[in-house]
Structures are given as structure tokens and as C-alpha cells.
Image: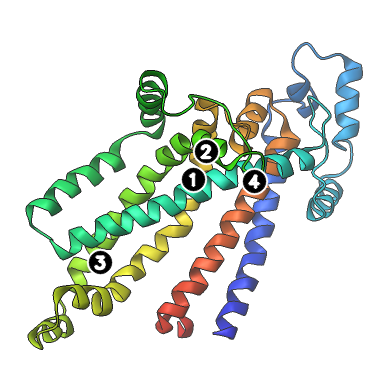
Amino acid sequence: MGRFIVRRVLLAIPLLFLVSLAAFSLTWLLPGDPASAIGGIDSTPEQRAQIRERLNLDDPAPVRYLTWVGDAVTGDFGKSALTERSVGDEIKRRLPITGSIALGSFVMGLVVGALIGLVQGARAGRPIDKALLAFVSIGLATPGFWIATLFVTFFAVKLKWFPAIGYTAFSDSPGEWLKHAMLPMFTLAILTWSEVARQLRTGLVSVLDQDYIRAARARGLPNSRVVGKHALKNAALPTLTIIGLRLGHLLAGSIIIENIFNIPGLGAYALAAVQNRDVPIIQAVVLVSATVVLLVNMVVDIAYAYVNPKVRVS
């Protein structure tokens, strides 16, 4: 197991290098002169000169890359090209906001999805399975921004159960945090539990058809024990593979959801940076988000290898 972990960590190093290189290359994707693109058509020569100096655009690309990566490792992502505020400080402030909502929706999605998948797998082909299958299919097919709009209209505007917009830090008031975070978390959780339920149901249907399951039932074991003790472990293995993917989807989905609910998280920060062509912010958000996703995927791979020993020797 230790050797597998070392291999997985070593594999992440070149991936992080490629991600950092891709994030750094965003400067070259801007049309024309990067300083002019960042400053806008109304920028003065002095403003463009300041941008070039701040971003070291006159230095050779390898020197700029090494300087940028070296600073990024220490948490220094430079300053915003528009506001001149520290990008690193803004990310430190906003990342916990996005992280709390993403983690809450992730846990909600796993719990609800596992319950739905268990019921579907244990009752495959029966009316309850067909009803839940339709429910899951709707969750998979419905865009998140449309669900968020419905939630705001119904639960916030009409019923007034939750605030429509805004955010309160957990440290300030756990109750107010939950009230503001519930609708965004629920919106992001729908796709997660739909995917988990579909994957777990498929795994259970396949596993419950195996000979060792039929043998367990022939020995008179109750269905709950057959499913919970013998089938669930093997059926859950494919579900583990989508956990890392779901986190990436949550980070991407937060860009839209945070703007709908006016949450000052990393997603809203990234969208504003794209609209303003604020390259230092975009580079930092891409690098931080990719690093988080890589770390989570590494943990998921290690957990998968722990549950399934065959992976360790592959």
C-alpha cells in the first residue's frame, strides 16, 4: 500500500507542473498585447506600462514562469491587474466560503444518493425503483442554474423560508450560515446524489446477480444482510471513482450558483476576473482549483486501492 501511495504522489507532480504551465500560459491567449487587453481600450500608455511592469511582461517567458511558480508556492499570486489587491489574500478569504458550500452539498449528495441507490438496487424492477429512476433522471437532466432559479422563486420569494441572496460566515452565526447556504448546497447536491444513486444502483444490480450472492440467499440470510454485508462493498467500488469528478463539477458549478445567490466565494471571484480580463486572478484560481481537485482525486485513488487490493499491483 505504501508503494502505491508513493507512486500516486509522484504521478501528481508532473500533473501539477502541466496545470501550472497551462495557467501561466493564459497571458498568451489574450488577443494582441496582453497589457492592452488587460487594461482595456481606454487605458493610457502609462497604465499599460504599469501593467507590464507589475506582470513582468518584458521578461523572458521562462523567467516569468519560474518567478510566478516560486511566488505561488508561498501563496503569493501577485496583485489584481484591476484593483491591485493581493490575489492570495482574496483567495484565502473566499476559498473557505466556496469550500463550505461545496463540502456541505457533497456530503448531502453522497448521503441522499447512497440511500436512493440502495433502495433502487435492492428493489430493482419494482415500482419504487422505477419511480426513483425517473426522479434521478430528472436530476441528471435539469440544469443547475434553472433549479437555483426555481428554489429562489419558491422557497425564498414565495415561502420566505430562506434568504434569496447573501452569505453569513459560519464563525459569525452557524444558524444564519445554514439558512444562507441551504439553497446553494441543495442545488449543487442534486446532480451529485443523482450520479451516486445511478452508479450505486447499477453496481448493486450487477453484484446481486453473482453466484456468491445467490449462495448467501440460499443459506437463508435476510435480504438486508445480503445487500449490506456482502453486496454493498463491491457495488460501491465504481461509485468511488466519481467522487473526485464530482468535486471538480462542484467547483465549476459554484461559478454560476455563487453568482445567482450573490455569495462572495471563489466562483464569483473567478467569473468577475474573466469578465474584467484580470489575468493574475484567473491564473491563481485555475491553479488553486486544479490543485484541490488533484489532491482529492489522489485521496480517492488511495481509498479505492485500500478497498480493492487488485489496484495496488496493477
Location of residue 5 (image quadrant): bottom right
Answer whether residue 227 is visible to the viewer in this image: yes
Residue annotated with mark 4: 96
In primary-sequence order, the first of circles 3 and 2 is 3
Query: What residue do we see at 21% from left, 77% from top?
Result: 225
Q: Secondary structure at mark 2?
A: helix
User: In front: mark 4 or mark 2?
Assistant: 4
Residue 243 pos. (x, y %): 44, 59
Do the numbered discs 4 and 2 sit on residues whose CB atoms are within 8 Å?
no
Residue annotated with mark 3: 203
The span from disc 4 to disc 1 (Cα, nearest Å) is 14 Å
Residue 19 pos. (x, y %): 65, 53
Query: What residue do we see at 14% from left, 46% from top?
Result: 131
Taking the image as shown, residue 211 lies to the left or right of residue 285, namely left
Residue annotated with mark 1: 250
| Camera-side residue of 305 and 17 | 305
Query: Mark 2 belongs to which amino acid?
Result: Ser
Q: Secondary structure at mark 4?
A: helix
Disc 4 packing (10 Å; few <14; some 14–19; many ≥20):
some
Location of residue 150 (image quadrant): top left
Do the numbered discs 2 and 1 sit on residues whose CB atoms are within 8 Å?
yes
Residue annotated with mark 2: 254
| Camera-side residue of 119 and 176 | 176
Answer whether residue 22 is visible to the viewer in this image: no
The span from disc 3 to disc 1 (Cα, nearest Å) is 24 Å
